[in-house]
Amino acid sequence: MIGIESKLSDNVKRMRPSEIREILTLTENRKVLSLAGGLPGPEVFPKEELAAIASRVIEELGDSALQYSPTLGVMPFREAVVDFVKGKGVKVNDNDRVAVTTGSQEAIYLLAMTLVNPGDGIVVESPTYLAALNVFRYHGAEFIPVPIDENGMRTDLLEDSIKKAKQRGINVKMIYTVATCHNPTGVIMSDDRRKELLEVASKYDLLVIEDDPYSFFVFDDTNFTHLKTMDSEGRVIYLGTFSKILAPGLRLGYMIADRQLTRAVELAKQMVDLHSSTLSQYIALYAIREGVVDKTIEKARKAYKEKRDVMVDALEEYMPEGSHWFKPKGGLFAFIYLPEGVDTADMLPTAIDRGVAYVPGRNFFSDGSGANAMRINFSYLSPDKLRTGIKIIADTAKDYLASKRATSA
Amino acid sequence: MIGIESKLSDNVKRMRPSEIREILTLTENRKVLSLAGGLPGPEVFPKEELAAIASRVIEELGDSALQYSPTLGVMPFREAVVDFVKGKGVKVNDNDRVAVTTGSQEAIYLLAMTLVNPGDGIVVESPTYLAALNVFRYHGAEFIPVPIDENGMRTDLLEDSIKKAKQRGINVKMIYTVATCHNPTGVIMSDDRRKELLEVASKYDLLVIEDDPYSFFVFDDTNFTHLKTMDSEGRVIYLGTFSKILAPGLRLGYMIADRQLTRAVELAKQMVDLHSSTLSQYIALYAIREGVVDKTIEKARKAYKEKRDVMVDALEEYMPEGSHWFKPKGGLFAFIYLPEGVDTADMLPTAIDRGVAYVPGRNFFSDGSGANAMRINFSYLSPDKLRTGIKIIADTAKDYLASKRATSA
């Protein structure tokens, strides 16, 4: 048999496995409580409604719903997406267009393809969504990490970070932010900071990617305005998804941005996958029209808030002294800093053996920090299992610390 | 508003619109008989069966079918794909793995990503599938075109073409072929030539991509053996799709290849779209199990053979003298050479105004030839409309020729 390895392209050398996907594969056929993925709780899937809608879509519109469709998405669905986000307070400009994508992941990939030249600088929250880091890194981006606190990105440090990057000769091109219900920490950027972020973006002529999968799940009375809505210069690219508000199995995300950019994304998508599932688009269209999406949002928000509270209680009860975290104001995740000395990547195999999985923190930082941190998801498991999972993680961390101390003693 | 154009990456400069997709968009809301796309006839979609299956899948397996799933595909579906292709005479090696993709297009894209370095040489049939050309070109491939005749690629010219490319310093890496029911000509490569192709591939240590969307639609008594089945060295990468044998709207393709390559494709796909629609995969799984795919194949083969015959009759009756084509032995397309002097790209706007669309031939050649050729699809329209469409094309061509002669006189 021939050796494939020598035939692989140089691109492959730049590819890093997604830690989340690898953990999902690792735990696929094992009885492991997974706090690793960003999976919606299956109890919020509107199964009955979607079963009925799916068969109705095929019966009523089969000739279209089963057929090839335009690269940017089927027109009624694209229109429904615009109406839907407008109803959620997202401003859509006359010059904007919608691109339907195969999950939000594809939107990030297509944006990297169409916007990033090797060496271009991208401002990111530190920590930030690891799969975005992977994609931008693959395209040769230089990261400009800006720390966060409980009010989101430290915009007081933003301009200085950009200046320093420019001094190093970096062509700073954009800011990537999960401003609302941040992944992985669950914090929400304050409106003051959003304003400041946009002012800096304007001053340095940067694009802003507002990656917004979670803003439907704000648990407490936190007010916020979408960056897309605040933006009067057309520099915000808005990314949304139906993965958390309907079903990830449909693989439907969308991008709303300036028509010139959307056209470039269309050309890229023609090569990548021609178009996203037509059937999924019609199913989601019916689900929007019939109120199933809004109902799912309500149900999920309630369920996730309850789980968030269970998680926070369990964290407070079980985690070793010296651990800290932000209490998530929304979303699906919490980011836990364990005491110095814990290496969460090193600890993961033991945790999996004991029946629980999480994502090591280092993956969420562009600068290799975060060895003692981990992301845990609270949307997927039942409250009981969530509690059990957190206890196992905490016990594993305590044992890890004890054995470390024993070794160094 | 800011100018996006200056912010686009250099990649965008290498992107060419897919002529097929652009024509589809152009004709979307117009009453045009489209012979341009590669659309299945909607009358062969198993609508009733799929409506029932879709709702059953969600009811019975909703927790999984609506959820995120592994990047290479859900395991029972991947296993069913292997059994399915084995049943169709495709050999699958122990060392092979299946990657489920968002249509066959994504498989081509992921292969280009993982295999092609700028300047690598790819042998292609001349003409060949235009979207593959687009993707490979984007990745910087050099094409080595080999002409075809009614028995497929002229393998007697293959070795010489490769030698010449090597003399020009090109790193010849693979052969891309639609060997069975070739796109755009509908010819089938003879088994002798397949053998010769594999011998040359072995001698020059080339990979072979067997892109095989159409082999289920062989109309006449043509025997053939899949390249994948003839290959004893693990150099054939097999691409299949459910677009033509179930429904393109599901966006489901697959690749079967050596595990090392499949692993590289997995890493690439993690970045591109995480995974393909879970719901689509379960729907296709049920459709395979319940015989719906096989029934659809039979129905489509019969319908397309009838349409092929109608088309050939119409071509013989209407096309201007001096036109020629291969009678398609299978598949969805015919490739028509009009008399010298016709520029089918130049003629297209008139044709669309008169109510018919096709794809200009030049797009199917890597070397810019084929100006007087066009690809027409015969699977989509009803026999009556197909006949009408061909008459309009023929009349338009005749008028085009007459006005040309008048101008040059």
Image (spheres, coloured by chain):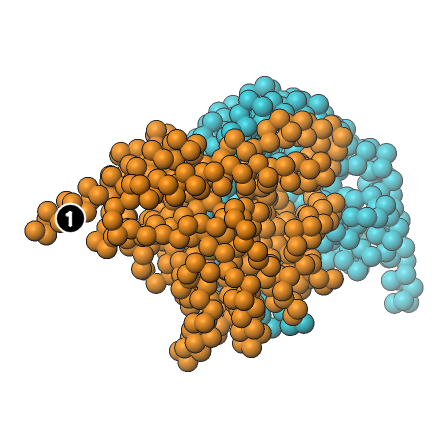
Chain colours: A cyan, B orange
Outermost residue, left direction? Answer: B409
Kindly identify the residue that appears in the image at 31 percent across and 41 percent down.
Answer: B317
Image mark 1: chain: B
Q: Is residue A408 above or below residue A110?
A: below
Q: Quadrant of the C terminus of chain A?
A: bottom right
Outermost residue, bottom direction? Answer: B167
Please indicate, yes or no, whether residue A8 appears anywhere in the rendered image. yes
Q: Quadrant of residue B199?
A: bottom right
Give A160 or B185, whichever is nearer the viewer: B185
Q: Quadrant of residue B403?
A: top left
Which structural element holds mark 1? helix
- Name the residue that disc number 1 marks: B404
Q: Is residue B105 above or below residue A117?
A: above
Outermost residue, front direction? Answer: B221
Give left or right: position of B157 versus B232. left
Q: Quadrant of the N terminus of chain A?
A: bottom right
Give left or right: position of A64 versus B373. right
Kindly identify the residue that appears in the image at 28 percent across and 48 percent down.
Answer: B345
Give B175 or B148, whichever is nearer the viewer: B148
Kindly identify the residue that appears in the image at 84 percent across and 52 percent down.
Answer: A351
Q: Position of residue A45 (x, y in %)?
A: 70, 29
Q: Position of residue B154 (x, y in %)?
A: 44, 66
Instruction: Please state which amino acid type lies under the numbered disc 1.
Output: Lys
Kindly identify the residue that appears in the image at 49 percent across and 72 percent down.
Answer: B172
